[in-house]
Image (cartoon, grey):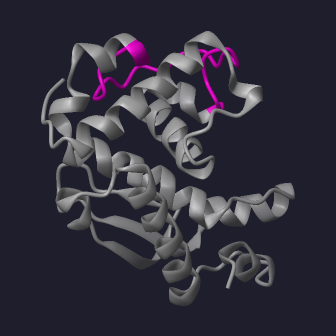
Amino acid sequence: MNPLRALADNPLRLVNLKALQVAYDLVVEEFEQLGFYDDRLYQVEVYLVPVSWAYGFQRYGGDRSINIPAVSGSHLLDVFRGERTDLCDVLRHEYGHAVADTHRGLMRSRRFSSVFGGSHESGHSREYDPDEHVTVYAATNPSEDFAELFYLYLRNQGQLPRCYNKPRIRTKWQFIRDLSWAIQQGRRRW
């Protein structure tokens, strides 16, 4: 069953356990194929929660769980705007945060700060620039910039889409590719 189809048949975009399991299985398979899935990430649990404003959220520094609401205010707004947010993309994005949380030594680095324009924990936003950010939301702060790029990296099997083939975005994409290698090697720091 395609998780997109499950949501398409559901005009209010309510997430159920079956759709979440299908999306989870697909995303974990991508993680394994691209070299991100390790013992640390295996310990991150995904929960279906009743309601939230967000599409999903990850408890950074806490129990590290990913929470996906059955009813999301953001999904309901999408209905009124005629937009659609893919459940797999939400999981990919939240797993980007989980990778950052479970591999903090690689994320709290000069390399990350240099590539993403600030430390992972920095809350400073930047003006959206399509030559630097893959989405408007990516300009929110460096951690969201990373998570947005991460979900696209997974969705596209590590192949940079032509529309994002810009020097600053290529540099960030290479960081994610190198991060996969570092995780595969069991590295904790660069």
For residue 38, which quarter of the picture? bottom left
Q: Determine the residue positioned at 34% across, 40% down.
A: 180
Left or right: 101 in relation to 177: left
Left or right: 177 in relation to 135: left
Q: Determine the residue positioned at 35% across, 56% down.
A: 58
Q: Determine the residue positioned at 39% across, 60% down.
A: 32
Say above or below: 14 vs 180.
below
Q: Quadrant of the C terminus?
A: top left
Q: In which quarter of the image is the N terminus?
A: bottom right
Residue 173 percent location from the top left of the image: 51, 27
Q: Can residue 54 be seen in this view?
A: no
For residue 2, which quarter of the picture? bottom right
Residue 95 percent location from the top left of the image: 40, 54
Q: Is 46 within the magenta?
A: no
Start and end of the magenta stretch? 115-136
- Viewer-nearest residue: 117 or 126: 117
Residue 114 percent location from the top left of the image: 35, 10
Q: Determine the residue positioned at 12% across, 36% down.
A: 188
- Viewer-nearest residue: 81 or 139: 139
